[in-house]
């Protein structure tokens, strides 16, 4: 009976997390809807005060800043708007999964960031307070094994960064009024 309960719990947890997985898939980006007048200006990423939560692989400030900047530029550079907006991100904390014992201890990667959007024409921030996001790695076929065994550190960091860019885009779409054309 205990074994059955454990299996049900594991399957339920897997289903729940699979449902929470966000798709950072870049396929179909050309067909996406415009985001008002949004056109990417600058991307600023800082990780000077990033905190590592154990167990975790060590990721340098430069690695975080480079990966996040690349993911943001890749996701947002295709918007055809005619007014510049800037995206500022601070990487606050992370835990990048280490190799573990499959199924028993298969840690998952997570990061915490804050984001702000700046309106170039207005010369200031659009959102009064930075928006905080908790970003999880994508769930894939290696979910039970854990990304610490199946992916390199740079692949894990790139995955978290792409998921962060996706979450920022979703937040911006929820606030599409920010990007109305200004005459």
Image: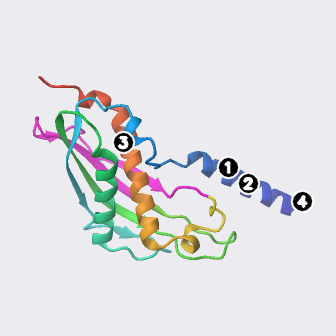
Q: Which mark is residue 1?
A: 4
Mark 3 and mark 2 residues within 8 Å of each other at the beta carbon: no
Q: Is residue 163 left or right of residue 128?
A: right
Residue 180, given in percent of the width and then of the height, sits at: 23, 26
Q: Which residue is mark 1?
A: 15
Residue 177, given in percent of the width and then of the height, sits at: 28, 27
Among numbered discs 4 and 1, the one appearing first in the sequence: 4
Q: Which residue is mark 3?
A: 169
Q: Which residues are magenta?
A: 111-140
Quadrant in which the C terminus appears: top left
Q: Is residue 128 left or right of residue 168?
A: left
Mark 4 and mark 1 residues within 8 Å of each other at the beta carbon: no
What element does badge 4 sit on?
loop
Q: Which mark is residue 11?
A: 2
Q: Callout 4: 10 Å neighbours few (<14), some, many (20+)?
A: few
Among numbered discs 3 and 2, the one appearing first in the sequence: 2
Give the residue at x 26% y 43%: 129
> What is the residue that sits farthest to the right in this orientation?
1
Q: Is residue 33 visible?
A: yes
């Amino acid at each position: 009976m205990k074994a059955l309960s454990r299996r049900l719990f594991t399957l339920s947890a897997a289903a729940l997390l699979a449902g929470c997985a966000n798709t950072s898939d870049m396929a179909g980006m050309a067909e996406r809807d415009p985001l008002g007048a949004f056109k990417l200006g600058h991307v600023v990423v800082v990780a000077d005060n990033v905190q590592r939560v154990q167990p975790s692989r060590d990721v340098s400030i430069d690695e975080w800043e480079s990966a996040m900047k690349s993911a943001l530029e890749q996701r947002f550079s295709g918007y055809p708007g005619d007014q510049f907006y800037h995206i500022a991100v601070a990487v606050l904390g992370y835990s990048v999964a280490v190799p573990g014992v499959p199924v028993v201890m298969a840690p998952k990667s997570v990061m915490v960031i804050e984001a702000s959007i700046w309106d170039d024409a207005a010369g200031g921030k659009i959102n009064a307070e930075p928006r905080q996001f908790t970003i999880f790695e994508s769930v894939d076929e290696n979910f039970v094994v854990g990304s610490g065994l199946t992916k390199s550190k740079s692949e894990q960091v790139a995955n978290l960064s792409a998921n962060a860019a996706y979450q920022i885009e979703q937040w911006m779409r929820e606030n599409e009024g920010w990007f109305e054309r200004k005459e």
